[in-house]
Amino acid sequence: MRVKVMPKIILISILTVFPYKSQSSHKNVCFMLLNVKHTCHLVKLVLLLGKLIHYKMKLNYLFPHKYKRIGWIILIPAVLLGLFTLITNYEPYLLEFNVPAIFAEKLFGENEYFKMINNNILNEILGVLIIVSGLFVAFSKEKLEDELISKIRLESLVWAVFLNYAVLLLAIIFIYDMPFFWVMIFNMFTILIFFIIRFNWQIYRLKNAADYEE
Amino acid sequence: MKNNIKVERAKKNITQAELSKLAKVSRQTINAMELGKYVPSTVLALRLSKIFEVEVSEIFMLEESDWE
């Protein structure tokens, strides 16, 4: 398995990381086609990596149990800090950096591709932290990940997806302009949050019911 | 689906917790099965039949509603 996949992965990652330089980036159509090509390579890479991991680890797409605690420890402060920065628009000067951007558009300005731009990286850091730690909390194995837990996990995931899109549908229909932008920001994380709440609540109820017996 | 897990457990004189250890599932799963809230996989059903030393069909029984 390994022998077959590794060269492919290396080739595709090279194609993904190094964009073709020849076309001038002003021709938008050319650029977009190029982008599509890169995206295809990227998707291919991710799929191949997934396959590799799957074969190597007999994967069920879950992290080990200890990641759950790590996730909680990062998630709670990150969410609190995230809410705080959203509400107060807090951007410490310390975190102003020049960062490489694949795509950036200034408000009422020109589109910019593959350029260094100045940006406050606090919200980026918080976004990454919330998503990664949220994934840890949501998709770590329980202490005893048996078939009932798997069933509850699946049900909760379906439930969370439905709820998330129900909320989003309502928002699309009834909320406009800037408030909708806010909805989109929250919507990046709500699917994880809904899942975490529902899943843990179900587990809690199950434990309680079992303790009540006997 | 009905099941006799509680009865079989009483025959063997083991608690839910002990059975859960033997079957390598959580106690909540045993409890949910006894209450009829959860239908186990074939593997778990076969494990239980090994543990209780009876046929699977003696532990689990179909009901009318299972045909609908």
Image (cartoon, grey):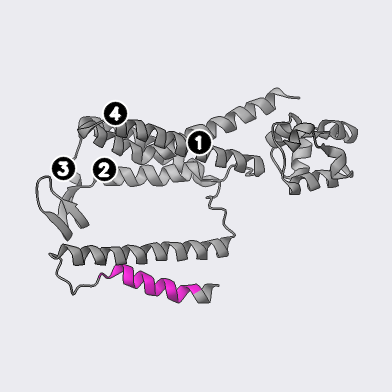
Of all chains, the one bearing label 1 is A
Measure the C-alpha gap from mark 4 to mark 1: 23 Å
- Which residue corresponds to mark 1? A159
* Mark earlier in primary sequence (2, 4): 2
Type of amino acid under label 1: Trp
Element marked by disc 3: helix
Q: Quick one: B30 or A72, which is closer to the camera?
A: B30
**Residue B59 location, quadrant:** top right
Which residue is situated farthest in the left direction here? A109
In the image, which disc is placed on residue A174? 4
Vertical position of residue A13 compared to residue A202: above or below: below
- Which residue corresponds to mark 2? A123
Measure the C-alpha gap from mark 2 to mark 3: 13 Å
* Mark earlier in primary sequence (2, 1): 2
Type of amino acid under label 4: Phe
* Mark earlier in primary sequence (4, 1): 1
Q: Are marks 2 and 3 on the same chain?
A: yes
The location of residue A9, given as percent across then percent down, is: 42, 71
**Marks 1, 3: nearer the viewer:** 1
The residue under the point 58% across, 42% down is: A142
Binning the other alpha carbons within 10 Å of mark 4 as few (below 14), some (14 to 19) or many (20 upward) gives few
A156 lies left or right of A97? right
Element marked by disc 4: helix
Q: Magenta stretch: residue B22 in it?
A: no
Vertical position of residue A25 compared to residue A197: above or below: below
* Mark earlier in primary sequence (1, 3): 3
Range drawn in magenta: A5-19
Type of amino acid under label 3: Tyr
In the image, which disc is placed on residue A93? 3
